[in-house]
Image: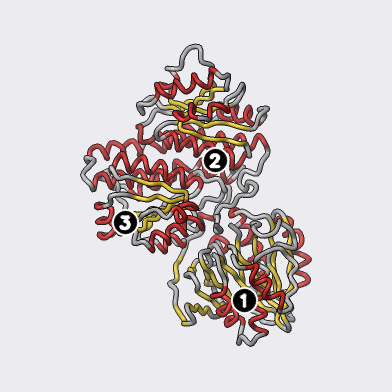
């Protein structure tokens, strides 16, 4: 969540900062701001609450006031400490004696209260309710107490900070210099062409400006000027590798779609084809995920696997549990990442730990990963961001290959997670001699037909739109989602989607749990969305659950293949959405499309913000 953009040495600094912030809007925010030095070295800020457009209205006057500056920092804020307001927006400025600094910051300073008390006793005058405001005052105080430079001040401050964060600072009277540090939140250096360099939380901010980046490690401190980049770890100069990134595809826009989410839903056939091309052999039609001999040996001998993730990635992990237990016969535990460390489960040395995260920066998942790593686990990461913190911490990274996902509600990345987990389970089952090559090839062949099937689903959406219009105008505000087997986590995924973007309350349960409590919620007119397949061995029980809903006059909505819908009792009234009949292992893919489109069309009918729903962020970098 949040975005940081810093520029030194470019005469279009303010334009680059604001353009970069616009590219990071997808991460979620509720206010934005910019700080810059004028030609005399004086520091100015411009901040606004709400969407970036509100800030951009003020930028022409701000630019005129500042002049042709080449030093600027900017930020989009997602509120943690203090409500969204101009006062609480970043950048924050602190003055102690002759020293004035501005800071932008992602993450949380957990000991900010103690810092605020100490700095207030030394004369700091705080105006915001944020934890961030302690940072510029602390840096100014360090300089006032004799720190030789802002770099030295950052180095002194870093060990005193508790929590995960990334920050960038600039100092009044010191043009063309920025200082930054990070711990548990992303920050990287963009290497400009000519006399300019950059500090950003996400390389996408510099699409079209930079191709080469250096990713900082935890507790690195960086000093950036137009001509130099100095990185320090524990006070010693270090060199971080330069990585070249192609960001052209990530900056391609909506390509004619009304929302990024709809574009990303429609990209799923291409995502499936891309993954199959990269992660299966063209000739043998077998999975081709790459593992080092050490990792392969760990997987071959694994007696249990822990999967940890958050939100949609957690439900992908639940599908992965089914795949791994059924195909590789390995017991799998799936945890919500925020609970994993605190549950403190017993971890056998040499065990396998899988983290799933679209961004690779999800704070809870990253913390769980570090916990598992400290307990001797072999770390695998499934991520869409191969240069992320999780990818760099992993023993092995499996790239999702979904390309950049902008909408907060995950669609194509979820499909990529599930597909890669299926290929992983097939490869592991084959490696452990539990599956024959012929059985695996049969599944791969069916997967190769999947892009065409998904495309056909995307071309027939009228029944889903009609249902969505009804849900958007229904008297109540609650729904139930039910499923069995592989469709139980898909019911949960459908529920979280419609919650995220339409703000309707939705709950999900395995269908068999209805009698154990949730059936009390069923009343006349309550929409109950049931997922059913004709070939997973569970249809008869699912039809019984439909009768339970109908007997209490709930509104039965059935998403199922035609063979399943043909078995509906004649006296059962139901709204039916039909999906293609697929191999039982492929059910999550055929059901993803209607669940995603139902959420999307319900949200658009209600007029909510589809791509940036309230209170949510794309990359959650705080616990």
Residue receiving disc 3: 348
Q: Is the Cβ of the residue at disc 1 closer than 8 Å to that at disc 2?
A: no
Q: Secondary structure at mark 1?
A: loop
**Is residue 230 something that shows in the picture?**
yes
Residue 235: give x, y in percent of width and height. 49, 82
The residue shown at (77%, 70%) is 64
Q: Secondary structure at mark 2?
A: helix
Q: Is the Cβ of the residue at disc 3 closer than 8 Å to that at disc 1?
A: no
Kindly report which numbered mark, 3 or 1, lies closer to the viewer in this rendering. 3
Q: Is residue 71 shown left or right of residue 219?
A: right
Q: How is the image coloured?
A: secondary structure
Q: Earlier in the sequence, mark 3 or mark 2?
A: 3
Residue 137 sits in which quadrant? bottom right
* Disc 3 to disc 1, C-alpha distance: 52 Å
The residue shown at (64%, 61%) is 19
Marker disc for residue 103: none
Q: Is residue 338 shown left or right of residue 291?
A: right
Residue 469: give x, y in percent of width and height. 63, 29
* Disc 3 to disc 2, C-alpha distance: 33 Å
Kindly report which numbered mark, 1 or 2, lies closer to the viewer in this rendering. 2
Within 10 angstroms of label 2, few (less than 14), some, or many (20 or more) residues? many
Q: Secondary structure at mark 3?
A: loop
**Vertical order, 542 against 309 (above or below):** above
Residue receiving disc 2: 496
Residue 44 sits in which quadrant? bottom right
Marker disc for residue 9: 1
Q: Earlier in the sequence, mark 1 or mark 2?
A: 1
Q: Nearer the viewer, residue 600 or 348?
A: 348
Residue 133: give x, y in percent of width and height. 68, 69
């Amino acid at each position: 969540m949040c975005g940081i953009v810093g520029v030194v040495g470019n005469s279009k600094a303010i334009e680059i900062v604001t353009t970069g912030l616009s590219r990071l809007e997808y991460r979620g925010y509720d206010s934005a701001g910019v700080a810059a030095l004028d030609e005399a070295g004086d520091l100015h800020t411009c901040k606004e609450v709400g969407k970036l457009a509100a800030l951009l209205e003020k930028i022409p006057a701000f630019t005129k006031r500042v002049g042709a500056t080449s030093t600027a920092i900017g930020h989009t804020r997602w509120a943690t400490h203090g409500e969204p307001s101009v006062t609480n927006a970043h950048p924050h400025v602190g003055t102690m004696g002759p020293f004035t600094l501005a800071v932008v910051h992602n993450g949380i300073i957990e000991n900010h209260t103690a810092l605020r008390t100490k700095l207030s006793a030394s004369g700091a005058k705080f105006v915001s309710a944020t934890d961030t405001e302690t940072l510029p005052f602390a840096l100014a105080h360090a300089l006032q107490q004799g720190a030789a430079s802002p770099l030295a001040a950052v180095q002194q401050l870093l060990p005193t900070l508790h929590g995960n964060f990334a920050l960038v600072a600039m100092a009044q009277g010191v043009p063309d210099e920025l200082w930054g540090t990070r711990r548990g939140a992303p920050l990287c250096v963009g290497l400009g062409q000519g006399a300019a360099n950059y500090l950003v939380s996400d390389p996408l901010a510099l699409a079209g400006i930079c191709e080469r980046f250096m990713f900082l490690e935890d507790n690195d401190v960086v000093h950036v000027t137009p001509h130099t980049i100095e990185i320090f770890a524990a006070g010693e100069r270090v060199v971080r590798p330069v990585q070249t990134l192609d960001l052209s595809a990530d900056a391609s826009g909506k390509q004619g779609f009304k929302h990024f989410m709809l574009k990303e839903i429609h990209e799923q056939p291409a995502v499936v084809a891309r993954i199959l091309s990269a992660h299966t052999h063209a000739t043998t039609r077998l999975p081709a995920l790459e593992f080092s001999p050490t990792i392969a040996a760990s997987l071959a001998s694994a007696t249990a696997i822990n999967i940890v993730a958050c939100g949609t990635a957690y439900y992908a992990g639940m599908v992965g549990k089914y795949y791994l237990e059924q195909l590789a016969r390995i017991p799998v535990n799936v945890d919500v990442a925020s609970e994993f460390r605190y549950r403190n489960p017993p971890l056998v040395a040499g065990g396998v730990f899988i983290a799933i995260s679209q961004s690779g920066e999800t704070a809870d998942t990253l913390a769980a990963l570090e916990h598992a790593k400290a307990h001797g686990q072999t770390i695998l990461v499934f991520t869409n961001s191969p240069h992320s913190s999780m990818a760099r911490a992993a023993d092995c990274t499996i790239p999702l290959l979904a390309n950049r996902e902008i909408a907060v509600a995950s669609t194509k990345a979820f499909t990529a997670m599930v597909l890669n987990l299926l290929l992983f389970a097939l490869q592991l089952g084959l490696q452990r001699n539990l599956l024959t090559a012929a059985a695996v090839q049969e599944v791969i062949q069916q997967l190769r037909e999947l892009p065409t099937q998904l495309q056909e689903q995307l071309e027939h959406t009228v029944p889903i739109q009609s249902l969505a219009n009804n849900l958007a105008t229904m008297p109540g505000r609650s729904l139930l989602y039910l499923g069995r087997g592989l469709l139980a986590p898909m019911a949960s995924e459908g529920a979280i989607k419609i919650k995220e973007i339409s703000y309707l309350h939705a709950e999900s349960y395995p269908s068999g749990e209805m009698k154990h409590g949730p059936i009390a919620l069923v009343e006349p007119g309550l929409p109950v969305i049931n997922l059913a397949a004709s070939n997973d061995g569970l249809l008869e029980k699912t039809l019984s659950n439909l009768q339970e809903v109908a007997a209490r006059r709930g509104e039965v909505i059935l998403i199922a293949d035609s063979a399943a819908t043909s078995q509906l009792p004649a006296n059962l009234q139901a709204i039916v959405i039909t999906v293609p009949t697929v191999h039982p292992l492929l059910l999550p893919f055929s059901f993803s499309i209607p669940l995603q489109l139902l959420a999307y069309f319900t949200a658009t009918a209600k007029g909510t913000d589809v791509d940036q729903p309230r209170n949510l962020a794309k990359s959650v970098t705080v616990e």
